[in-house]
Amino acid sequence: QLMKVFVTRRIPQEGMKILLQAGTCKVSLWDSDEPVPRAELLKGVAGAHGLLCLLSDRIDAEVLNAAGPNLKVISTMSVGFDHLSLDEVKKRGVRVGYTPDVLTDATAELTVALLLATARRLPEGVEEVKSGGWSTWKPLWLCGYGLSGSTVGVIGLGRIGMAIATRLKPFGVKRLLYSGRVAKPQASEVDGEYVPLDTLLAESDFVVVSCALTPQTQGLCDKAFFTKMKNTGVFINTSRGAVVNQEDLYQALSGGQIAAAGLDVTTPEPLPTDHPLLTLKNCVVLPHIGSATYSTRGVMAELSAHNLLGGLQGSDMPSELTL
Ligand code: GLV
Ligand code: GLV
């Protein structure tokens, strides 16, 4: 008797190959690059033993009920799991796999790229070259902020936060501050100083958000938060959009409360093209591409497939979330 698996999107073939060659499951796939419509998701999971999903799929009681009692495992091809209703999942005894570690380097690289692009105003510069705004070399034109001698504050010094700090230090960062629920022993590797959030905001030239989205971090970056930052401060978020109050960010950016912001994540995703943030030159918005290297996405797909198979067989999953 083959076990039934629903995969909510086309994923890199490395992952599909593992599922198909296992020979233990019957895989049905939402064969598209676009998200599965809710009604199709509810239909697709019916009777499934395993679900392989993405961060764009909201997996809540409705989906779990639609799946029914066969469901043993949910494998999400992401490190974030805020799209899963974990209470509901746990209640039903369903196991969860996710993809930490394998995307740490790619996401940290993207964060550094976004920070430099934002601080040195690269998108504005590219636009000026294309539009004919580049008239000559000008001493006061397109100046930004440098990392050398700066203070960087990382909110959430987890795996990715550490990887970001490790990459930023060689740029000549003078002080590396971090805040979060607890001090991290590994912070000593980057000479990280554990400080209260208010201190981090007041003293950092760059504020980098790399924490998980939880009830505690939802809306953390609001008016009071931006007011505490330096007027020359640069704000970077590569975690989840909902950590930021975007109206407050818009006010802070347009009113000169902070200098610039670089976002790889927004609410909603995609951000509507007429969103006020997109009218601002000092706001750089990327389409959630933190883990988007060919090799990283391939390894994420492989790990998701192995997690799913482990869960189906009732054996070890390479990366199981502790519920
Ligand atoms: C990306 O945001 C992920 O959670 O993998
Ligand atoms: C978050 O999951 C991290 O790896 O920092």
Image (cartoon, rainbow, N blue to C red):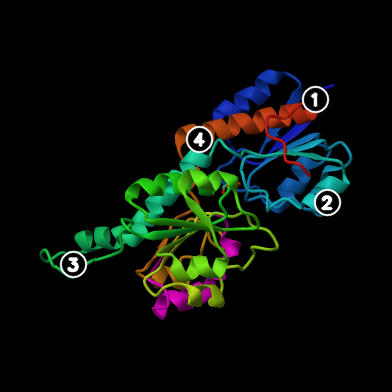
Query: Mark 1 or mark 3, which has the lower sequence index?
Result: 3
Q: Secondary structure at mark 2?
A: helix
Dot 3 beta carbon under 8 Å from ligand 1: no
Q: Is 300 in front, or is 275? A: 300
Q: Which corner quadrant of the image does residue 75 belong to?
A: top right
- In the image, what residue type sits under mark 4? Thr
Give the residue pinned by disc 3: 133
Circles 2 and 4: CB distance less than 8 Å? no
- In the image, what residue type sits under mark 3? Gly
Position of the N terminus by quadrant: top right
Q: Secondary structure at mark 1?
A: helix
Position of the C terminus by quadrant: top right
Circles 4 and 3: CB distance less than 8 Å? no
* Mark 2 and mark 3: Cα distance apart in space: 55 Å
**Label at residue 313:** 1
Highlighted magenta segment, given as a residue range: 239-260
* Mark 2 and mark 4: Cα distance apart in space: 30 Å
| Residue at position x 35%, y 46% in the image | 170
Give the residue pinned by disc 4: 296
